[in-house]
Amino acid sequence: MIARISGNIVLKGERFLVIDCSGVGYKVYVSPETLRIAAQKREVSLWTYLAVRDDALNLYGFLHLAELELFEMLIGIPGIGPKSALGIMGVAPAETLKTAIAAGDTSYLTKVSGIGKKNAEKIVLELREKLGAIESEHATNNLRQESDVIEALKTLGYPTTEARDAAQKIPKDITNMSEKVKAALKLLGQK
């Protein structure tokens, strides 16, 4: 029904944006990553999903069409509602989540409040075939190493979002785990 919305950001909440579109303010729920990116902008354009319930019409917004597609796959799983799906989307970028699901790695999914091991396994089981065997052993190994770097940085006291951002910016030519952590710390020290 409402597929895309563009306009000025008039309010930034904890989990949502209010976007002024031709004089009408639309409340759009977004992931923490989208909220962080939008905090640096005055105007935004989002792909949207309209969730219709008996007592509410809620808009969920995404910067990229691939994020919306993954969100729609997640809410297609019985027991996963839009808020849980948005929580999952907030754990890592869509491509990382797709890689984790294709590899059968439930650790990213269990970081979300309300998503236990059983639900994480259910998500992997439901979506693994839809996503196909898109990832090789090399990509799966990189995913594990990225997860290990994030955990190491969190142990050192860095917030999850900062740790994840630093881990994703590590040059691809660095393959040694300790060198990856050093590179991430160097990136974090530049802020």
Image (tube, rainbow, N blue to C red):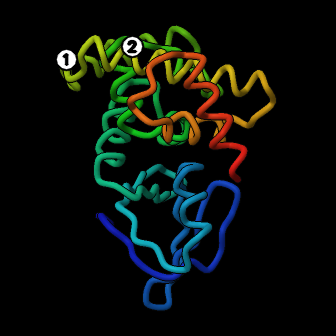
Residue type for callout 2: Asn
Tell me the SS state at disc 2. Answer: helix
Horizontal arrangement in the rendering, residue 64 relative to residue 13 (left or right): left
Residue 126 can be seen in this image:
no
Q: Nearer the viewer, residue 161 or 63?
A: 161
Which element type, helix, strand or loop, lies under badge 1? loop
- The residue that mark 1 highlights is 133
The residue under label 2 is 141
- Which of the 4 quarters of the picture holds residue 95? top left
Q: Residue at x 70, y 27 (%)?
A: 153
Vertical side of 98 occupied by 148: above or below: above
Q: Is residue 22 left or right of residue 163?
A: left
The image quadrant of residue 12 is bottom right
Residue 114 as seen in the image, left or right of residue 65: right
Asked whether the viewer can see residue 96, the reply is: yes
Of residues 95 and 31, the one nearer the viewer is 95
Task: Give the mark toward the camera: 1 or 2.
Answer: 2
Question: What residue lies at 29% left-to-right and 47% top-to-bottom?
Answer: 66
Q: Residues within 10 Å of mark 2 (few under 14, many from 20)?
A: few
Q: Nearer the viewer, residue 9 or 85?
A: 9
Q: Vertical placement of 146 versus 25: above or below?
A: above
Residue situated furthest right in the rendering: 157
